Amino acid sequence: MIRKLKNGQYRLYSRKKNPRTGKRRNLGTFSTRAAAEKHERAVQYFKQH
């Protein structure tokens, strides 16, 4: 899940909420949406292999 921050950057969050905190895990902050999407694909690849 990618969200745009107030400062114009994009942050990648985990899809599932953390059951202990009820929030999503921060998986990185990026200056462009394309960079965030690229990292999201890398995360999904890593989860499957």
Image: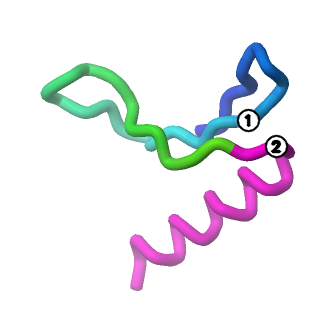
Say which element carries label 1: strand
The 10 Å Cα crowd at callout 1, few under 14, some 14 to 19, many 20 or more, is many
State which mark lies toward you, 2 or 1. Answer: 2
Q: Residue furthest bottom?
A: 49
Left or right side of 42 for 49: left
Residue 35 horizontal side relative to residue 26, left or right: right
* Residue 12 % position (x, y): 59, 42
Residue 6 in percent (x, y) is at 76, 14
The residue that disc 1 covers is: 10
- Report the amino acid beneath label 2: Ser
Q: Nearer the viewer, residue 7 or 1?
A: 7
Q: Is residue 49 left or right of residue 22?
A: right
Magenta region, main secondary structure: helix
Residue position for label 2: 31
Question: Where in the figure is residue 38, as x and y percent of width and height?
Answer: 74, 63
Q: Which residues are magenta?
A: 30-49
Classify mark 2: helix, strand or loop: loop
Give the quarter of the figure containing the N terminus: top right
